Image (tube, grey):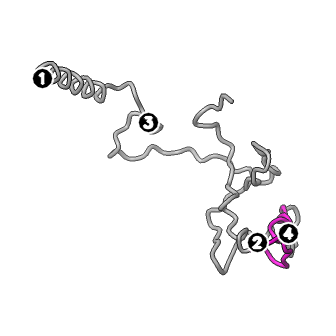
């Protein structure tokens, strides 16, 4: 019993010493959690630079511009102002024909409800270095 107690106390002491060490940091660095955030450098949007190269087959196209002020609700989708086939804005990529087919394979005259909320699949992209390197 005494040996078990000594081992448990040694494990507790080791874990306390390890937790107090400065060897491990989060992406935040060594600043305490209650400290204010460090300013983040704003990265450049890819506006006007064309499409973003896809990382894997069947990847949804990335959005090369900011969508901060865009609204996508049941009654309004700001993406459709430029990307709908009815839009006359030159240069904007139009919605793929797959977005006009319902789950039964029937062609629709307007965008399918299951494809209406664009940001479920499409995300904005900025020019940044990856936080973690990809070795594959």
Q: Secondary structure at mark 2?
A: helix
Give left or right: position of 132 versus 124: left
Which residue shows up at 64% across the image and 37% down it?
Answer: 129
Q: Is residue 91 visible?
A: yes
- Residue 121 found in image quarter: bottom right
Identify the residue under disc 2.
80
Identify the residue under disc 3.
26
Q: Secondary structure at mark 4?
A: loop
Decide which of 127, 19 is in the foreground and name it: 19
Mark 4 Cα shell of 10 Å, populated few (<14), some (14-19), many (≥20): few
Identify the residue under disc 4.
89
- Residue 54 found in image quarter: top right
In this view, the residue farthest toward the front is 1
How far across and down, in percent of the image, does residue 13 sit?
Answer: 21, 24
Mark 3 Cα shell of 10 Å, populated few (<14), some (14-19), many (≥20): few
Q: Which residues are magenta?
A: 93-112
């Amino acid at each position: 019993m005494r040996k078990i107690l000594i081992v448990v106390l040694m494990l507790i002491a080791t874990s306390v010493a390890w937790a107090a060490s400065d060897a491990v940091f989060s992406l935040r660095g060594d600043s305490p959690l209650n400290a204010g955030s460090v300013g983040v450098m704003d990265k450049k949007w890819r506006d006007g630079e064309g499409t973003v190269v896809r990382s894997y087959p069947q990847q949804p196209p990335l959005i090369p511009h900011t969508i901060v002020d865009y609204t996508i609700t049941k009654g309004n989708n700001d993406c459709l102002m430029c990307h709908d086939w009815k839009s006359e804005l030159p240069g904007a990529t139009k919605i793929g024909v797959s977005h006009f087919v319902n789950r039964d394979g029937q062609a629709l005259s307007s965008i399918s409800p299951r494809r209406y909320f664009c940001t479920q699949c499409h995300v904005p992209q900025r020019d940044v270095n990856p936080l973690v390197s990809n070795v594959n």
